[in-house]
Amino acid sequence: MARKRNNGILLATIAAGTYAYFSKKENRDKAQVIFQNAKTKLDSFLQSQKYNRDSETKVGHSDPYDLQDNKMVSEGSQTSVHYYNQQVEDDEAKSHETDGLYTKKEQGEIGQAQ
């Protein structure tokens, strides 16, 4: 209970101090300049990070802030899945025909030979 009261007193003190500070036009102007400078620096930093991310090759996991790439990954790449499946089917079909120097026998042929 005392902790809630202390938080209320702390909040009221901060609010009163903020009001007293911003009551002067000079302090409000300083705060606006500081805010604009911080905003400009933040925008510049974010643009440089975006540029760095765009110039890197994408290997492994996608960047959580690259929304377009994340959307593509969540939809899945059906072309690559189809290509992989086709390659596996082709490899299986070829492996039934020959195995190195020898011709593989099908399961039906093995049963008939015995």
Image (cartoon, rainbow, N blue to C red):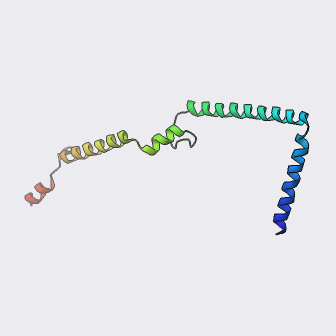
Could you tell me which residue is drawn at 22 percent across and 43 percent down?
94
Q: Is residue 38 above or below residue 108?
A: above
- In the rendered picture of this protein, how many numbered marks are placed on residues? 0
Q: Is residue 95 above or below residue 53?
A: below
Q: In terms of depth relative to the viewer, which is nearer, 70 or 86? A: 70
Residue 11: x and y, percent? 84, 55
Residue 96: x and y, percent? 20, 48
Could you tell me which residue is drawn at 91 percent across and 37 percent down?
24
Q: In terms of depth relative to the viewer, which is nearer, 6 or 113? A: 6
- Residue 32, image quadrant: top right
The answer to whether residue 61 is visible is: yes
Q: Is residue 34 above or below residue 64?
A: above
Which residue extends farthest bottom?
1
Q: Is residue 37 left or right of residue 30?
A: left
Residue 79: x and y, percent? 35, 39
Q: Quadrant of the N terminus?
A: bottom right
Q: In terms of depth relative to the viewer, which is nearer, 38 or 11? A: 11
Q: Is residue 113 left or right of residue 30?
A: left
The answer to whether residue 99 is visible is: no
Could you tell me which residue is drawn at 29 percent across and 45 percent down?
88
Q: Quadrant of the C terminus?
A: bottom left
Could you tell me which residue is drawn at 90 percent across and 48 percent down?
17
- Residue 28, image quadrant: top right
Q: Is residue 42 left or right of residue 64?
A: right
Q: Is residue 61 left or right of residue 15?
A: left
Q: Is residue 19 above or below residue 8?
A: above
Residue 56: x and y, percent? 56, 33
